Amino acid sequence: MVDAPAPTDEAVVVPRWRLTRTLAAGGGVLVLAAIWFTVGLIHYTPPVIGWLPLFVAVPVAGVTSWRAARDGRAFWRYMAVGIMLIGLGAAGNAHDYFSGEQEGQHISSLTAAVYTSGLVVMLLGLLRIPGARRTRVEWTRFGLDIATVIITVLTFTWHFGYSRWESWLGDSASSSAAVLVVVGAGFICVFAFVKVAFTGTGPIDRRALHLLALTGAVGAGGGALAPLLASRPYLNEGHVLLPATCFLLGLAADRQMRASRAGRPVPRPVPRRLSFMPYAAVVATAGLLLYGAAVRSPDILTIAVGSIAVTVVVACRQLVAMRDNARLLDDLDARQRELAYRATHDALTGLPNRTVLTRAITAALADDPATVGVALIDLDDFKAINDDLGHAVGDELLTGVATKIADRLPAGSVVARLGGDEYALLLRHDGAAVIAAIAADLRLPVHAGGHELVVEASIGLARARPGDTADELIRRADVAMYEAKGQGKGRLVEYAAAMDQRSAEQSRLAADLGIALETGGLHLLYQPIVAMPDGGLFGVEALVRWTHPERGPIGPNAFIPAAERTGLIVPLGAWILEEACRQAVAWRHELGDAAPRTVSVNVSARQLREAGFAGEVAAVLARTGLPAHVLTVEVTETAVFDGGTALDELRAIAALGVKIALDDFGTGHSSLGLLRTCPADVLKVDKSFVDDVTSSGEESVVVAALIGICQGMGLRAVAEGVETAEQAAELYRLGYRYAQGYHYARPLPAAEIAVYGQAATARAAA
């Protein structure tokens, strides 16, 4: 029969015991009372002297207990009140004796009520300890244990006091019954103290509770021996028992105060312990029954009734414990099932996790690898949704996407969430068709947090080959997914062997690029932006270049994608921005009015999706001292087409006074509506349109239309990639007044910009 304990016990380093004045007073009173009581056992002593020590011992114990409650442990106030009530009962006992109302060890019903009330107050204090609070089942077990104690104590008290009861009872049967009530209540307190001390004490020191249990045992056990003093009516067991209980109570309170001074208790687990009390009661009453039968005790019937009653109560308790244990086992099974589910499923979407997916892929490969495929789905720009609309909306979106994917899967397929906005699918047979259907579903709006959200996803697909493992298949699908991301949003790419080479190359490039960024291995070139038709210097565009220590110059079209994939583009972009602004300030100091009027810096979509990017721009302007109107931030249409955080950051940058340029216009999600929502000041026409501007094809029509739009909307138009004089002349004829390209100048080091500016000014003057 095992009872569930309180969850924690206490471990404190308690200062060593020392003799205090209150302990010295209580101990001295106990010694004097014990000496006087011993003398009384030998010959007659005046009764009044036996009662006097009680009126010192009780107040001392009460004061000590009250002091122990100063640190917030109200339990000790209950102990103080309880012992004072017991002292009041002792005064009533003395009054009963000296007034002649009772003789010897007898007490009146009123005195018994006062004694019992003190014990009840102590018991209430014990049950209010936080660590001792119980469930309904625990209260039932506790009540049955108390019944066991009462029956056992009364059975033993009846038997061992029986031989002297005739001389002790006299005409005071009611007072003797009152004594039995007090004794029984005392043993209940003893049991309660022991029970709590063994099953968790909350904030009360455990050793202090042990001392309290001993206190109750001395008081209750001594009270049970009252009939043995029947031949000495001038003595009362309380003469020595009450000073003893008061002294032990003082020791317990002192222990509590020392534990409190040691600091806050450190919780520690409490092991499950066998509840020995019911078994001990059965064994004790059975032994008493056998003893009574052997000596032909006249009260054998009473002992038998007590034994049967104890056995019945313990059997009931066992039944309650068995039912409670069965419930605990059911709860444990349910908890284990819940933990097993949590260990294999995503908490947000309820989808299986990587562990389940890996097992399923392994089983499918063992069955028929030719039919197995794995796809990885990564939502594009999910971070922007989280930043703009909050994580609650983002979570609803992830759950909605999970539902869409799961609804499309045929039998034998598995979808798992790997974390963040990434899902993985095990596909059988026609995986490409399933993926195409899922991609189409994902383009439909998803309701999340009151918003209708349209998402796109980059999807990588890998088909199994002989000898593949689950991890290898997932890795190849991941490579294909990043390849899809590199090609733009909403793409589906199937793995090819060449992708591993590109992926490994990009990883090496990104690693080397990180080193170059830390060690100063990068530098900027500046391509002039000129005023037409004379080619005078108007501004520059900052372009990053990298000379690898082993491989030589590496073009930005090679290392920028690696930086985008690894996230290195963010610190790289920050370095470019600060370096370009610093150089612009240097030109203004060196060249004065001849310095470039504007410095353009390219900003990636990844940078714009970082909340707070506008604040970084403001900080760079403040550190370098560059006026905001000199800086132009160039972004692609794709970076801001979907709005969200990117567009918010761009508006915040424009509010600083920084100019905004839409770069490579016409090659991405070109939309006239974008020119209204994006705070653009400059429109840069892509080289692909400029190349054929001298022909009568569609490109020349687009170039002509764009200059009309720019003039109508007050935008500055810049033609990119001008390589011939014919192109320059035609652009000027159409209305373009700014251009850049090799016809005017290649990207130049910062030191050559001043020379170029002076030469351009001289040409214009000539």
Image: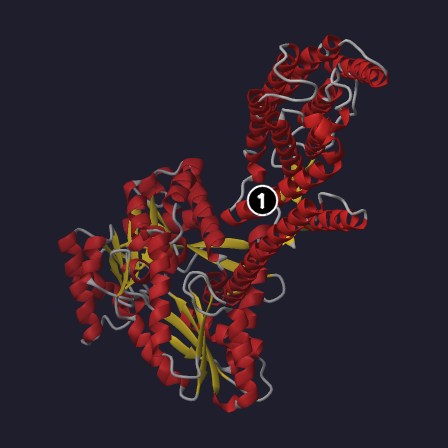
Q: Could you tell me how many numbered marks the image carries? A: 1
Position in image of residue 612 (x %, y %): 39, 45
- Decide if residue 144 is on the left or right side of residue 724: right
**Residue at x 72%, y 14% (from the top left corner):** 22
Q: Amino acid at mark 1?
A: Phe
Position in image of residue 7 (x %, y %): 60, 46
Quadrant the N terminus occupies: bottom right
Foreground pick, 187 / 393? 187
Q: Quadrant of residue 591?
A: top left
Tell me if residue 119 can be seen.
Answer: yes
Residue that label 1 marks = 142
Check the image and tell me how it is coloured.
secondary structure
Q: Quadrant of residue 152?
A: top right
Position in image of residue 325 (x %, y %): 58, 58
Foreground pick, 25 / 413? 25
**Residue at x 61%, y 31% (from the top left corner):** 181
For mark 1, give the secondary structure: helix
From this view, report whether residue 222 is shown above or below residue 393. Answer: above
Q: Residues within 10 Å of mark 1 (few under 14, many from 20)?
A: some
- Decide if residue 376 is on the left or right side of residue 634: right
Tell me if residue 761 can be seen.
Answer: no
Foreground pick, 134 / 525? 134
Position in image of residue 536 (x %, y %): 30, 51
Q: Quadrant of residue 172?
A: top right
Foreground pick, 422 / 703? 422
